[in-house]
Amino acid sequence: MGKVLDYPPVWLAMFAAAAWSSGRLWPMPVAPGAGWALVLSGLALMAAAAWVMLRGGATVDPTRPPTALVTRGPYRLSRNPIYLADALILAGLCLLWQPWAALLLVPGFMAVIQHRFIRREEAWLRARDARGFDTWAARTRRWL
C-alpha cells in the first residue's frame, strides 16, 4: 500500500474524500461558483504545467528523478505549479462540499505533499543542476 500512496493524485483523492465526508456529516452552506472556479483553475494550471514539463523534456512522474530543470511558463511563478493546482482543486472541492474543511484539509494536503514529494524532488534537482536550481529557487517561490 505504501507504494500506491507515493502518488500525489492518491493523496488528493484521500483529502477530497475527507472533505466530501465532512460535508455529509456536517452539512452547511456551500459556495458552488467559487468552488467550480477553483477546480477549473486548478485543472487549467495543471494542464499548462504538465505541457511545459513534457515540452521541456522533463518527467511528470514524482517517483522518478527529474530529467530536466524546467523554469519557464508556470514554473516562473511557482516551483510546484502542478502541486499548487492540486491544492486549488482541493480548495474548490471543499467549497463545493464543506467550506470549513478547507481550513484544515488544504494546508494539511500541502504539508503532506511538501514532506512526501517536494523535498525529494528538490534534492534531485539540486543534485542534477545545483547552480540552475539554486538560481531558480532564489527567485521563484515554492507554492506561489
Image (spheres, grey):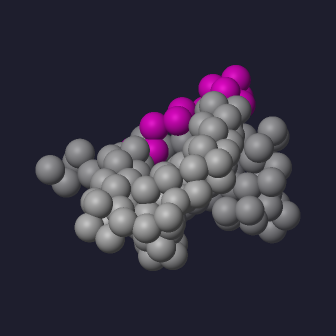
Residue extent of the magenta highlight: 51-63
**What residue do we see at 50% from left, 53% from top?**
96
Q: Is residue 25 left or right of residue 113?
A: left
Q: Which secondary structure type mostly characterizes the magenta part of the structure?
A: loop
Task: Report the front residue among 122 and 53.
Answer: 53
Q: How many dots with numbers? A: 0
Corner quadrant of residue 82: top right
Is residue 58 inside the magenta stretch? yes
On screen, 133 above or below 69?
Answer: below
Task: Report the front residue among 141 and 64.
Answer: 141
**What residue do we see at 50% from left, 64% from top?**
29
Residue 31: x %, y % from top left:
58, 57
* The C terminus sits in image quarter: bottom right
Corner quadrant of residue 71: top right
Q: Is residue 101 left or right of residue 123?
A: left
Q: Is residue 115 visible?
A: no
Q: Is residue 56 left or right of residue 128?
A: right
Task: Report the front residue among 105 and 8.
Answer: 105
Is residue 34 inside the magenta stretch? no
Residue 124: x %, y % from top left:
53, 54
Residue 69: x %, y % from top left:
69, 43
